[in-house]
Image: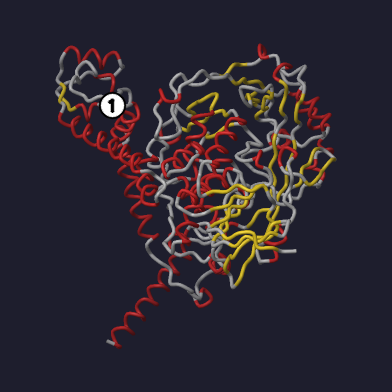
Amino acid sequence: MDYIAEKVDAIVIGGGHAGCEAALSLARLGKKTIMFCLNIEAIAKMPCNPNIGGTSKGHLVKEIDALGGEMGKVIDKTYIQSKMLNTSKGPAVHSLRAQADKVKYHKEMLRVLESESNLIIKQQEVASILIENCQIIGIKTVTDAIYFTKAVIVCTGTYLKSKVFIGEFSEHSGPDGLKSSLHLSDSLTNNGIFLRRFKTGTPARVDKRTINFDEMEEQFGDDKVTPFSFLNLENDIKKDQISCFLTYTNENTHQIIRDNLDRSPLYSGQIEGIGPRYCPSIEDKVVRFSDKSRHQIFIEPEGLDTNEMYVQGMSSSLPEDVQIKMLRSVKGLEKVEVIRGGYAIEYDCINSTTLLHSLEHKTISGLFFAGQINGSSGYEEAAAQGLVAGINAALKIDGNEPMIIDRSEGYIGVLIDDLVIKGTNEPYRMLTSRAEYRLLLRQDNADFRLRAIGYKVGLVSEDAYNKFLLKKEEIELEIERLKKVFLGTTKTVQEILISKNSAPLISGISLYELLKRPELNYKDFDLVNLDRPKLTDQVIEQIEIMLKYEGYIKRQLIQIEQFKKLENKIIPENLNYEKVSSLRNEARQKLLEINPKSIGAASRISGVSPADISVLLVYIEQINRMRRATNESIS
């Protein structure tokens, strides 16, 4: 029998990385919040790779931190190895990645959640959402408890009607043998929300004591550690690091896989869901890249107090006996013992184009979605969406306009814009190539781009914001000072240039101009730049990037101006696309389905061509002229 349990401001369904950021942002913005999860021990769990960050994902974590989120702070406390990726390339694609102690990460995030006075955690399954007149009013649990609320954020990850596959075996289960959510899908469907099936997977975990590391290449962390959180400096988080190891598959491994493809649920037709293109299983790799004689395999520790090692690069749903045989064919794993087998997992998710940029549903007021339920993949993508949904749910409750980060402001903006405008037919993964303004959207300047937004919203504290303002002032003052520091053709200056393989000076030059040379660094001139202030490495890094890439940055700023012009061309509300006679049918269907708010958004919809945009611009101008003429005749 139903009973009314409680009334709160907001409810978050799910305790994964999206749910954690959503619940924390709501609570910190003064909203009484309940976070429902299937198992408290699974809060902030890492059911797949035990790391945070990586290519483009590191950008997301930095942006989450800049806005006042938690992920960066927690990984700074619980990492066991830190590495900056892509350092041989330009700063736009530098990406921080940290191996996590997954148990300590969970415990630290749980501690943070439990410390929030406005947040209550409940281990209970949500069975249905309650809606009246297209407005969310609450949820009901499997025990028939009703909780009334003003906003609900669905962050169910891979648990909705989730099904695990290992060879011919399958069962309804969540990740790592946890409970599956079997009721909420029906409620969403009954409320007109279309669901589809996506799939992901994970490799085996193996016993460290049975690995021959001498046959592998040791992978060390960086000597210089870069924090994820802008509130931390290197010395705040520096610690001894644990090594990872690199090995490779071989032709024998590939033959074992080919001989057993008929036993793989991926190829036998058991799995309906669509898997991630950019994180394929080892079966997919062997089939799709048949010309490759080997694939990289990284052996990564799951924590300091466990023997479990993660076999990065060998995600598989092959039968258990095949997985063991396959693993033991790899150099260094000849005697390996499997602790947990790999598996594929299939789950329900929504069509993300049914959402606004705030991540609120277009037709159900107060209902938000974040994370893998939106068709994305990855902890970082989920956390970013959770933070945005939480902030916007709080703003919605207070009757304020949503916080929208556009494509020119952050990777978070690219992620959400891609999901709600372009949609996705497979688990969406963030990539640096998706960001057209990536030279400006670097991870090192995420605070410059987003700190003020986080402060305005209320998630960045006064102290944190003042520290940012001080950093900003230091950079601006030092750049102006460098313009006034002139170096002549002295012996010391020439020796510095020669030692750095840089052309000697013919005449005097400002240090500002000299530091634009790619081979020169700020600290190279300590001997002749005696009046320089004491600056942190973060400040120096910003100065060097701003100087060396000044021309490119100016060009990208011009591109962003053009982007903003299209974003500011608003499409009239309830525009009848059926009356726009010259639109192609495909474009008309897509525009009707997605209902973009601006010409810029319309131009990014798959199936809408530049010609369609031109037609739309002419039609809107005609409407505006008619309105102006009508207003003039009335006046």
Q: Secondary structure at mark 1?
A: loop
Q: Is residue 478 left or right of residue 226?
A: left
> Label 1, on which residue?
535
Percent from the top left, x then y, of residue 137? 59, 65
Work out whether residue 391 or residue 211 is closer to the camera in this orientation and state it.
391
**Residue appearing at x 57%, y 33% in the figure:** 105
Q: Position of residue 580 (x, y in %)?
A: 49, 75
534 lies above or below 108: above
| Residue at the (47%, 53%) spot, across then down | 391
Q: Quadrant of the C terminus?
A: bottom left
Left/right of residue 626 with respect to residue 214 in the rendered view: left
Q: Position of residue 448 (x, y in %)?
A: 34, 42
Q: Quadrant of the N terminus?
A: bottom right
- Circle 1 residues within 10 Å: few <14, some 14–19, many ≥20: few
Query: Left of 162 or right of it: where is 584?
Result: left
Relative to 206, say whether 199 is above or below. below
Residue type indicated by callout 1: Leu
Q: How many discs appear? A: 1
The colour scheme of the drawn protein is: secondary structure
Q: Tell me where residue 415 appears, x and y as whole percent.
A: 51, 48
Q: Nearer the viewer, residue 138 or 334?
A: 138
Residue occupying the point 40% across, 22% down: 235
